[in-house]
Amino acid sequence: MKYRKLGKTDLEASEIGIGCTYFSAIEENELKRMFDKGIDAGMNMFDFCEAKPVLRDRVGRIIKGRRNKLIIQGHLGLIMENEQEGRSQDLEKSRKHIEDFCARLSTDYIDIAMLHCIDQKEEYEKAIQSGLIDYMVEQKKKGVFRYLGFSSHEPELAGAMVKSGNFDVVMFSISPLFDFVFHDMERFFEMAEDEPYPKQLDIDERRASFYVLCKERGVGITAMKALGAGSLVDPADTPFGNVMTVPQCLHYALKRPAVGSVVLGFKDTSQMEEALRYYETDEKDLDCSHILSTVTGEKLKRCLYCNHCLPCSSRIDIGGVTKLLDTAATHGKTGSLSEEYNKLKVRASECNQCGLCMKRCPFGIDIVENMKKAAAMFEMVG
């Protein structure tokens, strides 16, 4: 494992980190094996943005006695209400849930306290007006929060937050799925890490400028969604002519300015082992410029199943439903997919089309339309 200093902090973060995307689907024994494998391999960056008490308790048991081996990113503004995860910039709700987080993980400090998923200017303003950011600054002075950060998918808003001077780290979505509009990548992969981006590069200029800003301001980046919810490594789902490998996805993210760690969600230890093969991969096999040159040139809109759209007024697991829909559309509807759909507590047909989810979606997805499609596919409606 290799380590990088995270911005101006004193944190030496592992280049590959552990994310919690699939924790709810992993049995405790397998999750423990995963942490054993990761920690033994030198992974110390751990992003934990789960609000469910049962998962917080499970992780607390698993990391007991080795808390000091991990750099934990804990999220403020991620809450549970009516048995659903949700987002809030309310001070009291956020404080209650971060205190619960610390109690269940048996820790009296958080290495990086992250303001959770700020994708709209109004959300940032609410965090300021409610006193939530002042609270974070106060807790940092007390040593309860060692450093402050936030997560976002929006480069212009994230840039404004970096310029505020309040934050040390940003968790940002980094992959070719987000960065590229067109193609011609040859020059891109010859660039040094700290070299300014030339304007002729076919990368979203807002994102390119944001990476450089973070580098200049000493704000470290922990990269999320490096596999594009698996689409970049899925031959039936990739936006490019060929799939990328997991090591190529890691290499891509780690080449961006200011990136200290790439946090991946693993379904099991075998996927973690695949990621660790990054360090055994020849440099020539990490190059993916030939793959990226086949991009269609269209901006892509797809669900990444992050559930930032929640809470749902009908209590639908929107990310779960959409993932089943996308899998069926790409690989064909199967009995196992139908069975998994039928296990859902709330079906897509119960969507009341309020549209609140669409306002929260970082990726501009027509969620209401997806719920209609899912109901038609799995419930034979309409």
Image: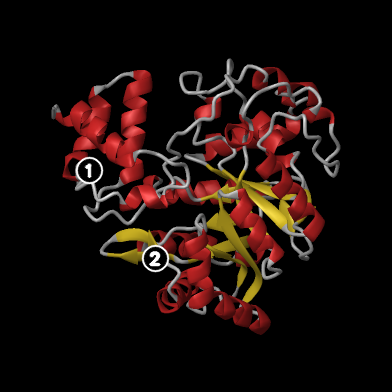
Graded by Cα atoms within 10 Å as few (under 14), some (14 to 19) or many (20 or more), the crowding at tag 2 reads many
For marks 2 and 1 on the same chain, the one whose residue lies earlier in the sequence: 2
> Residue 263: image x %, image y %?
60, 47
**Is residue 243 at all visible to an observer of this figure?**
yes
Name the residue located 36 percent from the left edge and 29 percent from the top edge. 326
Name the residue located 60 percent from the left edge and 80 percent from the top edge. 139
**Above or below, comparing residue 175 to residue 289 in the picture:** below
Mark 1 element type: loop
Name the residue located 84 percent from the left edge and 29 percent from the top edge. 190
Q: Which mark is residue 344?
A: 1
> Residue 375: image x %, image y %?
20, 33
Specify the amino acid type for callout 1: Leu
> Residue 350: image x %, image y %?
17, 45
- What is the CA distance from the residue labelled 2 to the residue labelled 1? 21 Å
| Camera-nearest label, 2 or 1 | 2
Q: Which mark is residue 372?
A: none
**Is residue 69 at all visible to an observer of this figure?**
no
Residue 93: quarter of image: bottom left
> Residue 99: image x %, image y %?
47, 76
Name the residue located 59 percent from the left edge and 16 percent from the top edge. 242
Residue 342: quarter of image: top left
Closer to us: 194 or 222: 194
User: Which residue is under mark 2?
Assistant: 79
Q: Where's the C terminus, which quadrant?
A: top left
